[in-house]
Image (cartoon, helix red, strand yellow):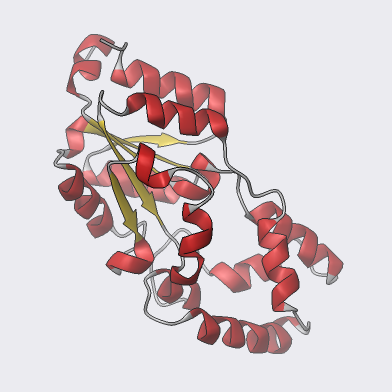
Amino acid sequence: MGWSSLMARITAGIFDFSGVMTTSPLDGVYDYEHSLGLSKGRLLSLIIGDHNSDGDDPWHRLERGEIPGTEFWEQLRERAAKELGVEIALDELARSFLKGYKPRPRMVELVRGLRGRIRTGLLTNNIKEFGGFWRAMIPVEEIFDEVIDSSEVGLRKPDPRVYVLALERLGASPEETFFVDDFEANVKAAKDVGLTGITFTDEDSVIAEIERLVGPKV
């Protein structure tokens, strides 16, 4: 299939939030781990569990809105002491998440420029208590036609049902839609549903690929 026929059928695009529309908040956690004398990834693994799946890890339940943040953080403190032998300070951990966590202006402008050309959706695994914060980082309501927040809908990536829900909200079919995420497992799940998957590696290549898929402005 040539580019012309592919471009003609793209009518919607779905974007991840953290790591795509913004930088990743995970790098700061690695610094906090180091300050606690932990090897890279040990604390992060305790916090988020298996990020390549959707199961009953406490983080997964938190992002589905099944447990409140206060319960999660208290359990995390207890698990860190028991399993890692460290005492974590939740305020310091929160600051580590926010370290270097900032919008990607070029991605914001890309999505803004797509409005009117295709339908745009934001599909984010997120936490209910953080809603006011992350929504204020970029003009979410201004640039996206639909916002699907895992903590509001009770589904999270890579559960295939959340991609189907996003498509329904956008009024688009899988073959007409692309999906961008920085986690390969989430991209693979989108491809399994029938979407065109794009793994975010860097802004230049992702922006160029999306512009090829969508085609020139009319």
Which quadrant is the N terminus positioned in?
top left
**Image position, residue 208 (x, y; %):** 46, 19
Left or right placement of residue 149 versus residue 169 in this view:
right
| Residue drawn at the location 69% of the way across and 77% of the way down | 90
Where 213 sits versus 76, above or below? above
Which quarter of the rendering shows the C terminus? top left
Q: In the rendered view, would you say 117 is above or below 18?
A: above
Between 55 and 7, the one lying in front of the other is: 7
Q: Position of residue 75 (x, y in %)?
A: 58, 87
Number of disc labels: 0
Q: From where the camera sits, is residue 118 visible?
A: yes
| Residue located 42% across and 82% down the image | 67
Q: Does residue 155 appear to the left or right of 124 in the view shown?
A: left
Task: Residue 196: give x, y in percent of width and height.
Answer: 30, 33
Identify whether 37 is placed above or below 133. below
Q: Is residue 39 visible?
A: no
Q: Residue drawn at (45%, 43%), measured in percent from left and top?
A: 139
Q: Residue at 46% x, 45% y: name it.
A: 184
**Is 66 in front, or is 105?**
105
- Which quadrant of the structure image shows residue 92? bottom right
